[in-house]
Amino acid sequence: MSRLSEQQILSRARASSLENVKNLNFWGSDLNDISVLRQMPNVEVLSLSVNNITSLKDFAHCPRLRELYLRKNSIRDINEIGCLKNLPKLRVLWLSDNPCASVEQYRMTVLKNLPKLTKLDTVVVEETEVLEATKEGLEIPTPDDLPVHLDLTATVDKNTLKIDGATTKDVNPQSCTGNDNPESMQNNLVNETNKLRAQLGLKPLLLEDQANTTTAMTATNVHKKAAETSPSNSRNQNILSAVLTLVQELDHTSLLTLRKEIDQQLQDFDETENESQTEMSRWRRKNQ
């Protein structure tokens, strides 16, 4: 048995960094340690069938995961399904030929806890199955130590943003004022967040879960008073809220890099301010 390494992934995917990998296939590689997946927030498709994986916990750190193929691994405990409950985009899951797939009411239990799946193993999920699963399946708790991914998706107005390649109108930055309207504030936040994500080479956020949007809106309300003074302050407030949203997706290394950059920016700002004050003092003495 072996550990999946960063070097193996970059070589196989021909990528410059783990964050750039979206599709990965390590079928039949005798893997049992896949913890490196925690550094892959943008991966969308993982094919890891015929390995020795025993837990689903590492996949909980892949918020964009849409398809997960794990046929013929060593996942024994059906409760491992709880590790996938915080993945908002997961639609295809293949767990057949794992020990957990042999438990009673396996399919009903998986669908009860992952009702957004469109395909489980080789069978397409029917709406009637999902309804039946709410009654027949077992409820599996989500482990407390797993990340909760902020996913601003599917409830934003169609005129505010580009969603999955569909062309829509952008929010006018000049309209980003200290408006008390929750929908307007939400749209402004999404717009500013997606501008930052575009600069980072990330996909735009989608609005799927209204409840999750509240988390980001809290950041907006914390700085609301500053936005009431002028349009420029309002725009800064929206950008700040967007940054706070993005920070939640960063890993430890990225956060350290961000802190270093912030410290440098603050140092440069202080130096500029000191220089300005010095020049002002000189001008005043000269004109006295």
Image (spheres, rainbow, N blue to C red):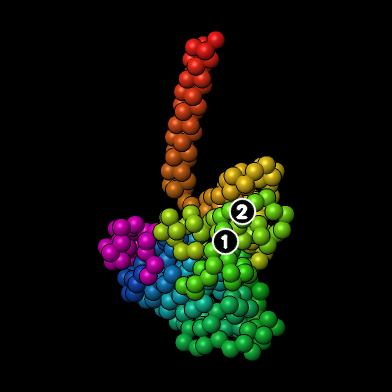
Kindly identify the amino acid type of the residue bearing the numbered disc 2.
Answer: Cys
Q: Nearer the viewer, residue 113 or 183?
A: 183
Point 44% across, 48% down: residue: 254
| Residue visible at 34% across and 74% down in the picture | 27
Query: Which numbered disc, 2 or 1, marks the residue that appears first in the sequence?
Result: 1
- The residue shown at (52%, 73%) is 90
Picture layout, residue 178 above or below residue 44: above
| Mark 1, residue position | 171
Q: Where is residue 79 shown, x and y percent of the image?
A: 58, 70
Identify the element where label 1 is drawn.
Answer: loop
Q: Is residue 97 above or below residue 256?
A: below
Image-based side of 53 in relation to 170, left or right = left
- Check disc 2: other Cα within 10 Å, few if <14, some if 14-19, many if 20+: many
Q: CA distance from mark 2 to mark 1?
A: 8 Å
Can residue 280 be seen at all in this image of the molecule?
yes
Q: Position of residue 122 (x, y in %)?
A: 46, 87
Badge 2 is on which residue? Answer: 176
Q: Which residues are magenta?
A: 1-23
Mark carried by residue 21? none
